[in-house]
Image: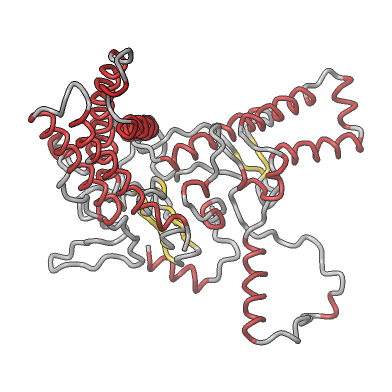
Amino acid sequence: MELNHFAVPGVYILITFLGYPSQILFLYLDPGPLSKNELILSNILLACIFITYTQSVFVDPGTIPNKKGKENEDGKEQGGLNGNGSGEKSTGQRTKWCRRCDAAKPPRAHHCKECKRCIPKMDHHCPWTANCVSHTTFPHFIRFLFYTSGGLGLLAYFLCIRISALWSERDMPAYLGPSPWLVAHLFITTIVNSITLFALFVLFVRNIWCLAVNTTTIEGWEIERHKTLVRRARHFGGWLDGGDGTKVRIKQQEFPYDVGIWSNIVQGMGSANPINWLNPFSRTPPLSTGLSFPTNEFEDPNLSWPPPDPDRSYRRQKPTTPSADSSSGFIYGESTLSPQESMVAFRARQEADVVRRRKPFVERVEARMAKDRLEGWLTKDTDDGGSSGSDNDDEMVEGKEGGRSRSDSVSGEEAWRNSEGERLKDFGLDEEVEFYDEPEENDGVPLSELLQRRRAV
């Protein structure tokens, strides 16, 4: 059994340990037990923590319908990928295709490697709830962080009062003070509470910020990745090499889903009533509202998010030279394999043909400059006072800022890390699917599959 199977029971045990034994501990420490009002407030917060955590764990994070919604008697669409049932207009953004689910997925959806499916407006997969923080679970998750921060902060206040009283009586004989077991309990509770409060409060503040600007944790990674590409492109006239050798235009693109603080909060919490934001029994936002999102119209609504990334494309490379032995035709070199093994080998070759991993950007620049030196181009640029050398130095620094190291080179550009050292897989995503997403063009996709995708969208 894996350790993550113990995460949820462990959190329940932690909440219980900090919530109930501490109330008993305060009976034997000066200045005495909690007052009636303090007990009521503490247990209300404790109940809210249990309720919101349970909802964060057991509420379904949602799934993506793989077919267009059926029409009701009035001919109106409901529940489909483009029919959100809320009367909102579609953003017009290109619908992506998940190769794992073999189905279309709407904007802001991602494939979770733990849940084994695409999750609408996925923020990240939380190991402590064993569930995805998504469009449907985010309100419960942020309410859990709010009540936990408040409850642990109140407990820290009560502990400080007892520690202060104990310190003021440090010169008294030991037999007049609390027993060593009570002191040990007080010490352990204080340490555990302080560490938990610090970690959850930082997480709470970060999620409040994400709620205010309407970004998910994954989209924050994508925004930083886009800024990195823009910095790279400045050194090469706004263009970067694509996965199939073509040039890709890179320009600054604004995040499309930040539509104002109030609208962002209403959208994220699933309600315009501030009372419902704090109500632990508030209902879960309907899945239909997580399939389409309004945009701020700073950019062309037909532009997709994330912006074009030349390293994330997986377009097939067209052969430029004939085969070394074109007269031999098709050669079957796996005749010793069983039918099942042959199918597995075929799938592996097919996947390798689709996803073409590339070395990290800094190594590609170094390789290209080494080739330039061999051809004498770099010498000429240096004699003319060119800036090729300084550009390379800037890119090396930029690569360090991106958090990548030489040890990541075997994984290619999908090993790119943000300033906090995070990769896509750290958020619970399947990097094989999410980094190499649906291509901008449909070259090489069979007609039957294109027709199937169009029907699904």
Residue 427, image x, y percentages: 47, 47
Q: How many marks?
A: 0
Residue 258, image x, y percentages: 34, 34
Task: Tell me what residue is drawn at x 72 percent, y 40 percent.
Answer: 406
Question: In the drawing, does residue 73 fall left or right of residue 14?
Answer: left
Q: Quadrant of residue 323?
A: bottom right
User: Which colouring convention does the figure follow?
Assistant: secondary structure
- Can see residue 213? no
Task: Tell me what residue is drawn at x 13 percent, y 69 percent.
Answer: 73
Task: Tell me what residue is drawn at x 28 percent, y 15 percent.
Answer: 169
The C terminus - image quarter: bottom left
- Indicate whether 100 appears above or below 175: below
Question: In the drawing, does residue 203 fall left or right of residue 342?
Answer: left
Q: Quadrant of residue 162?
A: top left
Residue 36, image x, y percentages: 7, 30
Considering every residue shown, the one lying at the far left of the view is 36
Q: Quadrant of residue 251?
A: top right
Which residue is nearer to you in this view: 328 or 32? Answer: 32
- Indicate whether 330 appears above or below 427: below
Residue 87, image x, y percentages: 20, 50
Which residue is nearer to you in this view: 44 or 252? Answer: 44
Which residue is nearer to you in this view: 455 or 41? Answer: 41
Question: In the drawing, does residue 426 fall left or right of residue 374?
Answer: left
